[in-house]
Image (spheres, rainbow, N blue to C red):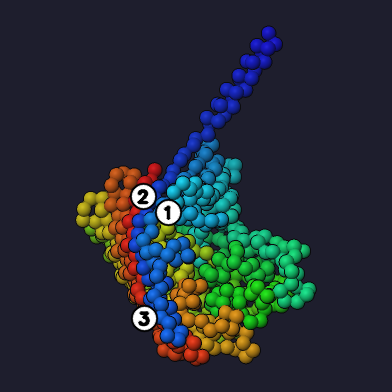
Amino acid sequence: MKKLATLLLAAAMVLGSVAGAQAIDWKVRGTWQMEFGLYDGLNFVKHTPIRGNNRNKVYGSGVTNGRSNDNFKAGQRVNIQLQAVASEVLSGTLHFEIGDQQWGRVGTGSDRNQGGAVGQRGGIVMMREAYIDWFVPSTELKVRMGIQRIDNPSFSMGPLVFGEDVAAVALSYKFNDNVSVTAFWARPYNENFAARDNSSGVGGDMSTAHAHQLDNVDAFALMVPLRFDGFRVTPWGMIGMVGPNANAIPNTAFNRLVTEGMTPAYYQTNKNRFRRGLDSDGNLDRAQLKLNQYGTMWWAGLTREITAADPFRFAWDAVYGSMTQPEASFMNRSGWHVNLLAEYKLDWGVPGLYFWYGSGDDGNPRNGSERLPVVNINNPNSGFSTFGANGSPQAATPENVLGMNFYQAGSWGIGARIRDMSFIEDLKHTLRVNFFGGTNSPAMAKYMLGKKVIGDGTFAGQGGTRRDFATFRAENGVYLTTQDYGVEINLDHSYKIYENLEMIVEMGYIHLWLDQSKSVWGPSRDGNIRGVSLTDAVKASVFFRYSF
């Protein structure tokens, strides 16, 4: 009898656990994306620099980031999002990304393209988001904790300062239909610094004595969305601190902040390699620069949309930002950006005009940079570009060929677009034409290239070596001065084959007019580099996207 009672009790416990599990409502969403594309000229360089009598064609200029030397690429990516819903006030979300897998690519180590060759088993399952949503009991205060997507507000161009998955705690509260508020604390970087023992001078042995100390980067933001009949407006602000050792992390986490514009332009382009303040490996030497205090950063922005005059729509963004390093003023950065958008909705499409302007560097590297600081921009739906900027929502199509934050800082432009054109059911088109130029001083470009130095040579290019445009572009993206211009054309199409299957065709073209005089991108004064041979960047990609 005892055995029977025990079995019944165990069965009840099992049934109870099953019943508890059934109380969770599981929701699954995802996409499969297949990509086939032709690309060329993404480094804008047709030939290598002329040295002596040598002039070589740069083959494989169709792709970036060293992923391939071919102009044709095929690949795929899968996104799966799982949501466990306990109730209206509690849920958890987990988002996996598998890929990008480049077809035929073996890959090694952490290469995202591994697993595409015959017989391979790609081990590229990555966690993009993992967070929980819950409401404070008996209130309308919503809390989201974990790795999540955060964008700064924008009704026109897309995020200008912050737009990426990040570890954060976000709070949001809706007062009424007109007023709500969102605040968050995010930690983009922490515990990535491997300390060096500099007691023996520059380039001492590695030491863990001070590892992971004073290397955190934290951001705190407040956004106040206001919604009324005919218009919306959102003022927002963000402040943060940058640990002194975060600046000394070579080629790891903080390197993205460097390459995406957190530090001054010349510091960005030199990749931590200028004559003073280096160790023997060419990395920033914290001991020599004596960085012991936290730096500060802050932004204030306003975005607005007006729909009262429908079918007209007007939107604009304005933001100013600053980063200050108290012990190294040449690392300071402050700047601003504005953009305007006007659209008119027709039955067959939405034509529009837009304009942007981002402050650029002056000619003095000692006072830092005058461009807008940008933490991290990974915007899958930039309204102004799907080729030069990060705007393509597709798999691994080459984008950002002008640089990660080119459209946010150091440039101006005017553009026209017609989006969502449709003359046949389930078939849409978007056409964009942009004419742009740089707002940076030509003198700053000369410092970057090593053609011009200050005093003891502190800011003399990469380790004091003069560079050409090809080397510069490969490391840093395009940096345009007030004497440089360009044009970009996007023609994108989407066709809904089935309810859940879409075919997308993206075509892009970019042409640059650079000042190739001796004073900027032309010959070096030492005669070793005699100029640059430019080519146009083009892409033609076909994607198949299954969404569920």
Q: Could you tell me how far apart the alpha carbons at marks 2 and 1 are, in whole angstroms?
A: 20 Å
Residue that label 2 marks: 545
For the residue pair 135 and 38, the one nearer the viewer reads as 38
Rendered location of residue 113, percent (x, y): 48, 55
Mark 3 neighbour density, 10 Å: few (under 14) some (14–19) many (20 or more): few
**Does the residue at mark 3 contact the one at mark 2 (Cβ under 8 Å)?**
no
Residue that label 1 marks: 104
Rendered location of residue 259, percent (x, y): 53, 70
Q: Is residue 6 visible?
A: yes
Does dot 1 land on a helix, a strand or a loop?
Answer: loop
**Residue 399 in which image quadrant:** bottom left
Q: Could you tell me how far apart the alpha carbons at marks 3 and 2 are, in whole angstroms?
A: 36 Å
Q: Residue furthest front?
A: 53
Direction from residue 243 to residue 528 in the image, left or right: left
Note whether 158 is above or below 533 in the view shown: above
For the residue pair 235 and 440, the one nearer the viewer reads as 440
Rendered location of residue 262, percent (x, y): 56, 71
Task: Please tell me the numbered disc located at residue 282.
Answer: none
Mark 3 or mark 2: whose residue is earlier in sequence: 3
Residue type at mark 3 is: Trp
Mark 1 neighbour density, 10 Å: few (under 14) some (14–19) many (20 or more): some
Residue type at mark 2 is: Arg
**Residue 55 in which image quadrant:** bottom left
